[in-house]
Amino acid sequence: MEKIKYSQEIEQRHVTYFEENIVPKIEQLYEVENYIFKKTYTVKKIYTDKKTYSAKKRYNFKKNGLNDHRRFIYYCLKNYKLLAIGNVNGTYLSNESNIKKKHENAFKKYRIEEKKTLKKFYDYAEENYKAVIDRIEDDTEYKNLFEKAFGYSSFTTGSLFEFIKQSVVKKGGRVSEDRIEKIIDQYIKLFSPKFAKDELEDFTESMCEIKEEYKKVSGDSAEIKRLFLEREKKWNLYIDLLNYNGEILKNVWNPYALVLESGVKTCFYCNRHYITPLLSSDGRFRATLDHFLPKSKYPYFSMTLYNLVPSCTVCNSSLKGSKEFDFEDINPLEINLDSCFNFILELGISKNHQVELSIDKHFLGKNKKKEKSMDKMLKLFKIKEQYNLHQRDIEKILLKKYVYNENYLKDLEKKLKDKIENLDKVQSLNDEPLSKFKKDIEKGFSDSEEFKKIEEYLMR
């Protein structure tokens, strides 16, 4: 629940991916529209000669929409680095006037429902852009074209082999004989540390045998993949947060690489579930990447780094689902949710307690809109209901607070000095589930009077 600031390396890798995979599609889209715009008078003549007055009015609307759209695509190209990162410190996503007021209307204005109408505009494009036309002929809405251009659906991981292969061969590239050796080297570098000395030699020999077997499969991509898959299963190879090596895999960029590089371990929304990824030959899991601003409404933000919130399946799919956030809502990548609210526990007569939530109005600047947004988020993700299931954890927290009281910890620190960490120190709230919950509950029983309540509670 702490705000994350992605490293400069993560941001650069995302920009590089954007440059190589998304900018060319946007450029192609702009050139098609640019060409059509030059043909305006030809199109206008057709409408003038053969259509009624009402049809002319409809054409003028679409002509203006085309003009707006062309300017918008040019804006995206000119500012593609901002669009790729969406830096939350005031440059793009958080500045509503930059996008919502200037461009959302233009985006809506040129939204054409009928694919035949959309096809007519693109039919005036040069032969070079037929590939673009083919990509859209089955689409019924303009937004689908934008979603394809920005390519979130192409931002995929694939198999463990594909993941490692991308460190050597660009996506869609051919695996040649010299490249197969480099891929084998990557496997050996990545997974050698997991083997004891007596196994390492066998593993290395097994991987190197692929070089000879490769010659027999004549470059068949399915067979090449099979050769690696056999070794992955035999040696139980997988990538997780513990063995991930960003230096070896620095050319790989996909959802797994993003979550692994970020080091985030728990859901940004609830801090209740682990989201640490694992990628193997026969199973995989990772955090889902929630689009804070929905890609259905803002397809041009579908690949913006700070619009992708690492979250658990419960929060993203089960609770949020199709519900939407917007510019005025609090983005967990933009602000520390930890500072926005507190867990409060009142000890009652029984041991069945109710955890309550308190929004920190002072931290939110007594801003009613922000308070409302925070309340919306807490209710949407059912934070109170989820944490009231942790009655057993509450007992453990209180017992720990009682046993490891402040005086005891100070005495322990004096005795052991630098040999142990201070038990109260937490590296990051994003590292461990329930960390904010534990911190708030312990903080709520810090003075002597509250401490007596814990003692009374534990003696029941």
Image (cartoon, rainbow, N blue to C red):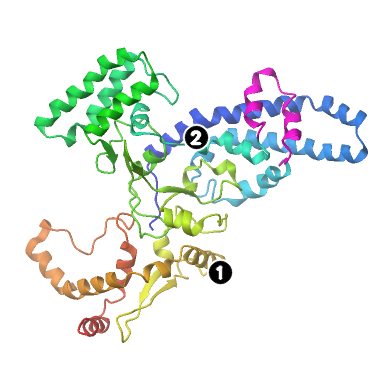
Disc 2 or 1, which lies upstream in sequence? 2
Q: Dot 2: what SS?
A: helix
Q: Is residue 212 left or right of residue 27?
A: left
- The residue drawn where x is 9% and y is 65% is 414
Disc 1 marks which amino acid? Answer: Lys
From this viewpoint, is residue 156 visible? yes
Q: Is residue 28 left or right of residue 8?
A: right
Q: Nearer the viewer, residue 146 or 332?
A: 146
- The residue drawn where x is 49% and y is 28% is 20
Is residue 339 rendered magenta in the image?
no
From this viewpoint, is residue 79 visible? no
Tell me where residue 30 sits by quadrant.
top right
- The residue drawn where x is 92% and y is 37% is 52
Residue 388 point in image, percent of width and height: 37, 71
Q: Is residue 108 left or right of residue 289?
A: right
SS majority, magenta: helix
Tell me where residue 335 sits by quadrant.
bottom left
Residue 441 point in image, percent of width and height: 31, 72
Q: Nearer the viewer, residue 86 or 224?
A: 224
Per the image, the residue denoted by label 1 is 368
Read off the magenta span: 111-138
Per the image, the residue denoted by label 2 is 154
Residue 301 point in image, percent of width and height: 55, 43
Disc 2 marks which amino acid? Answer: Ser
